[in-house]
Amino acid sequence: MDHISDENQWWTAPELEPDRTWKKPEVLIMCTSIFPEVSSSASAYDVANRRWYELNIDTVVRDAEDWMSDVITKHIKAYHSRHGTLPDFNVINTTREESTMTFEKKPNRVVARPIKGNFCYSRGESDILPTTTFDQIKNKVHLSCSADRCTWQGYDCVFKRVEFQEDLEVMEREIRQREKLLRALDEDPKTGFATIQAVFTCCPSLLSCSSPQTPMKFWDY
């Protein structure tokens, strides 16, 4: 996590991740906007496939989050059924009756929810966990919320990503707590994972992932 240190810097996670396994979409409507007497829009996140979408409707729509989610989900699944990949669009334009439908692609930084700042890791004297880079994480598949199952250098792992602004403080706190456990055991971070699991029944942090776009933390699985 040592590449993003400016607390005022805005960034977004990668739009399409290599080595990610497709899962049935789980589309969450994160926010909606209404232009009075004109149109509506929604910002949506497919948590299962880690991708943001925008939905635009040519009329005012209220209290229709379930319908919005269903529209986006339907077209993600239809595209995947035809092509075997995530859509080449991230914006859907339609009517309330879905009588017309158009698709377009906007830069991910426009569609995705940005995250401001980060915390540095691996350069401080107290940082004892090893680090790796995002491209070393393989076979990613959605597990729950912000956690993915993956493989790294032969390990079957879970990694937890920063998806929203609120995750930053939580992520740092969890890493520091596991560092404290390792220090209390007086064990090398590379060998103390099994002890943490056995003694504290706690999922140990294997290492920290360093990436300019997608900071995340590894757990041993």
Image (cartoon, helix red, strand yellow):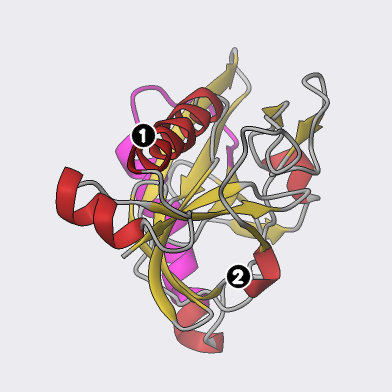
Q: Which mark is residue 65?
A: 1
* Closer to us: 172 or 81: 172
Q: Which residues are magenta?
A: 55-79
Of the 4 image quadrants, the one containing the C terminus is: bottom left
Residue 197 in the image, given as x and y percentages of width and height: 22, 54
For the point 51% across and 25% down, which residue is it?
32
Q: Is residue 102 left or right of residue 205?
A: right
Q: Nearer the viewer, mark 1 or mark 2?
A: 2
Quote the CA–CA distance across marks 1 and 2.
Answer: 21 Å
* Above or below 185: residue 7: above
Quarter occupied by the N terminus: top right
Residue sitting at x 52%, y 56%: 50
Amino acid type of the residue that numbered disc 2 sits on in the rendered structure: Pro
- Of the numbered discs 1 and 2, the one sitting upstream in the chain is 1
- Main structural element of the magenta stretch: helix, strand or loop? helix
Tell me which residue sits at (67%, 58%) in the image.
15
Where residue 145 sits in the image (x, y, percent)? 35, 46
Q: Residue at x 35, y 58 (%)?
A: 193
Residue 63 drawn in magenta: yes
**Residue with the most extreme top position:** 36
44 in relation to 60, above or below = below
Residue 201 in sight in this render:
no
Q: Nearer the viewer, residue 43 or 161?
A: 161
Q: Position of residue 218 (x, y in %)?
A: 47, 55
Residue 217 forms part of the magenta stretch: no
Identify residue type, mark 1.
Glu
The answer, for residue 167, to whether it is visible in the render is: yes
Is the residue marked by circle 2 packed among few (<14), some (14-19), or many (20+) residues within 10 Å?
A: some
Q: Position of residue 207 (x, y in %)?
A: 53, 56
- Kindly state the secondary structure of the residue where label 2 is placed: loop
Give the residue at mark 2.
Answer: 87
Regarding mark 1 in the picture, which secondary structure is present there?
Answer: helix
